[in-house]
Image (cartoon, rainbow, N blue to C red):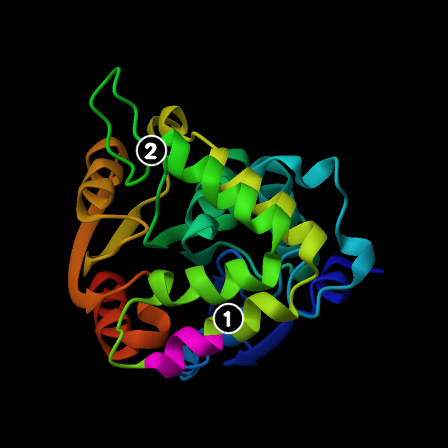
Amino acid sequence: MSPRERHHTRLSGVPDGAPMVFAHGFGCDQSMWRFVAPAFEDDHRVVLFDHAGSGRAHPSAYDAGRHASLEGYALDVTDLLDDLGLGPAVFVGHSVSAMIGMLAATRRPDLFDRLVLVGPSPRYIDDDDDGYRGGFSAEEIDGLLATMDSNYLGWSELLAPVIVGNPDRPELGAELTAAFCRTDPEPARRFARTTFLSDNRADLAAVRTPSLVVQCRHDAIAPVEVGRYVHEHLPGSRLALIDAVGHCPNLSAPDALVGAMRDYLRP
């Protein structure tokens, strides 16, 4: 089975257009881009896929050893781009996929034209030794993972609205809860540990692909100071602070996200 088949890959847009690859965050699938990706179909070859263990990816795509680190997911991305043979692509990564795309671009810079990093976080846990603020204490992350291990469905219902924000739009939290609940709990638990316990701060300096950091003004998962940290430590990056609430502007503020992307990608 080819990478494109394993990852339930869908292509749309202009066949000979500049390739643009959208990668979803933890617990989600490619449907999370349905308000954003179509905006680029008139002038891009748009690629949507599901990470191993997520969405409609084939069960054989997930390997506990390979996917014990974000490097395994990054290798999936480069394998997929090699399989598609589309040439240097704009990679749009949401949340943990921002770090996955960054690692993939470091590994294979020839496959990437630019990176759009939506709500990136190189480390979710605060580091008192150097004053880094990731948004969570180690105890909070341990508690989050323990709750997930003991009651995955309850964890999903509790955390999804926090991730999305926008309490006045409960349908968004309900949608993310449903996405979590569609995900196989065992790979999801492992992906959560890989996501929330990773520390990719030292990897930022190695990236040579031009990048846009898209940061929401109010984000409980990746606060503004995290977006600024990524921008300040990522060579050749630009920061776009959008007037949006929550960690999922692809759902809650797609027009603002599309606007920031178009401003960055404009020749």
**Mark sitting on residue 252:** none
Quadrant of the image occupied by residue 209 = top left
Q: Is residue 267 above or below residue 225?
A: below
Q: Is residue 21 visible?
A: yes
Quadrant of the image occupied by residue 162 = bottom left
Give the side of residue 5 with respect to residue 150, left or right.
right
The question of residue 174 being in magenta is answered with yes
**Mark sitting on residue 137:** 2
Q: Nearer the viewer, residue 157 or 7?
A: 157
Q: Nearer the viewer, residue 163 or 144?
A: 144
The question of residue 200 being in magenta is answered with no
Q: Residue at x 31, y 48 (%)?
A: 211
Q: Is residue 108 visible?
A: no
Q: Residue at x 52, y 56 (%)?
A: 26
Q: Residue furthest top?
A: 129
The kind of residue tagged 1 is Thr
Query: What main secondary structure does the magenta stretch of the protein show?
Result: helix
The kind of secondary structure element at disc 1 is: helix
The kind of residue tagged 2 is Ser
Q: Position of residue 179 (x, y in %)?
A: 56, 71
Q: Earlier in the sequence, mark 2 or mark 1?
A: 2
Q: Mark 1 sits on what residue?
A: 177
Q: Which residues are magenta?
A: 170-175
Cα gap from disc 2 to disc 1, whole angstroms: 24 Å
Could you classify mark 1 by the number of other residues whose Cα lies within 10 Å: few (under 14), some (14-19), or many (20 or more)?
many
Q: Residue at x 22, y 36 (%)?
A: 229
Give the side of residue 14 with respect to residue 161, left or right.
right
Q: Position of residue 258 (x, y in %)?
A: 28, 73
